[in-house]
Image: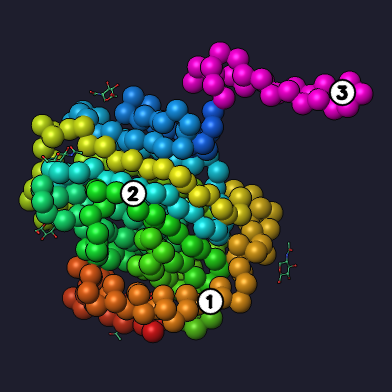
Amino acid sequence: MGSVRVTGCLAIAVLVCLSMVVGGVAQRGIPRDFNTWTPKQTRYSPDGRRVELLLNDSRAAYTGMGSKQTWLFGGLGAWIKLPANDSAGTVTTFYMASTGPKHCEFDFEFLGNSSGQPYLLHTNIFVDGIGGREQQIRLWFDPTAAFHYYNFQWNKDLLVLYIDNTAIRMFKNIENIVPGFMYPNKCPMGLYLSIWDGSSWATCGGRVKINWNSAPFIATYQLFRLRGCPATMGDQASITKCQNSTYAAPGKSSQTIGTARTRQLRNIRKNYIHYNYCDDKNRYNETQVPECKYNVL
Ligand SMILES: *[C@@H]1O[C@H](CO)[C@@H](O)[C@H](O)[C@H]1NC(C)=O
Ligand SMILES: *[C@@H]1O[C@H](CO)[C@@H](O)[C@H](O)[C@H]1NC(C)=O
Ligand SMILES: *[C@@H]1O[C@H](CO)[C@@H](O)[C@H](O)[C@H]1NC(C)=O
Ligand SMILES: *[C@@H]1O[C@H](CO)[C@@H](O)[C@H](O)[C@H]1NC(C)=O
Ligand SMILES: *[C@@H]1O[C@H](CO)[C@@H](O)[C@H](O)[C@H]1NC(C)=O
């Protein structure tokens, strides 16, 4: 850590507040808001607003960090640039997850590829410990050439995944329509980022493995936006507060993304989809995945 922050308040006629730093720089930005589990493979910019996650050795095939705060509903996102060139076998992630056995999770997982071949974006949604809602899309831009903004917008009626303000995935709360349907409305979640060796499945179904000669693989994240209702698993008062907060019902439009964005989403479904669990008839019938019917119509 190497830095200690001392805050003291002195009352001398007026109240003077001192915020003093001993032995280094006060933590700001990402190092203040996130815990890292792999400090040797993590590099921050001096202003703390950018972080690089390095994957550089087969013996340390995971690099990652997670937010100190957890939230129930909100808008959370970051600008991300993925490892370029020979990224086959790597998986770069940006996801929200709760803890415990019946966990909730929403994922962006970027599956690397051989030089010149495109990344695939894999997304999944877990509620009450149950996932199996995989979708994979091709991207309409090169995610290694520049930063793009990836974010989650999550309220009590709707969870939407966006890229650069384009809706790429939606998950509606249909509890009132489908009895027993589970929506993530009681699980406070943290925000996580990582890069790991997914050679066993990521690229061309696991046929193309990671090439350690091309290491380090570097995923860069910057300018996080963390706007959500703070809540903690097990603290029912905080959960109830968030269920009643403006993050739970942000205005009239909380139940819909509007016609323009619905059109975008349909376009993604039509032109960029690579795999969609909703269309996998060998795997599921309509009763098993009731949400599929309600999510783009
Ligand atoms: C990975 O890179 C970091 C930062 O350059 C370095 O400190 C660390 O020793 C490297 N790890 C391995 C296993 O090479
Ligand atoms: C990717 O390859 C190109 C061409 O060989 C090179 O110019 C560029 O620096 C490489 N990018 C990274 C991130 O290694
Ligand atoms: C990698 O590139 C191949 C060939 O273009 C493509 O079929 C595949 O979907 C790409 N992505 C992954 C993760 O395999
Ligand atoms: C939350 O809202 C519900 C209905 O809108 C209300 O019945 C309940 O008292 C509220 N709870 C809190 C803790 O504000
Ligand atoms: C769908 O699959 C489930 C589980 O296999 C089965 O119980 C159910 O009867 C099936 N429903 C229809 C409409 O086929």
Q: Quadrant of residue 274?
A: bottom left
Range of magenta residues: 1-26
Q: Is residue 25 magenta?
A: yes
Q: Residue at x 21, y 32 (%)?
A: 216
How far apart are labels 1 and 2 at the CA level?
Answer: 30 Å
Place of residue 204 in the rendered image (x, y in percent of width and height, measured from the top left) = 11, 55
Give the residue drawn at x 64%, y 59%.
Answer: 242
The residue singled out by tag 3 in the image is 11
- Residue 41 quadrant: top left
Circle on res. 255: 1
Q: Amino acid at mark 1?
A: Gln
- The residue lying furthest to the right in this view is 13
Badge 1 element: helix
Q: Please give left or right for residue 230 compared with residue 39 in the image.
A: right
- Judge left or right: residue 15 versus residue 60: right
- Circle 3 packing at 10 Å, graded few (<14), some (14-19), many (20+), is few
Q: Main secondary structure of the magenta part?
A: strand
Provide the secondary structure element on which disc 3 rests. strand
Residue 258 showing in the rendered view: yes
Dot 1 surroundings within 10 Å: few (below 14), some, or many (20 or more)? some
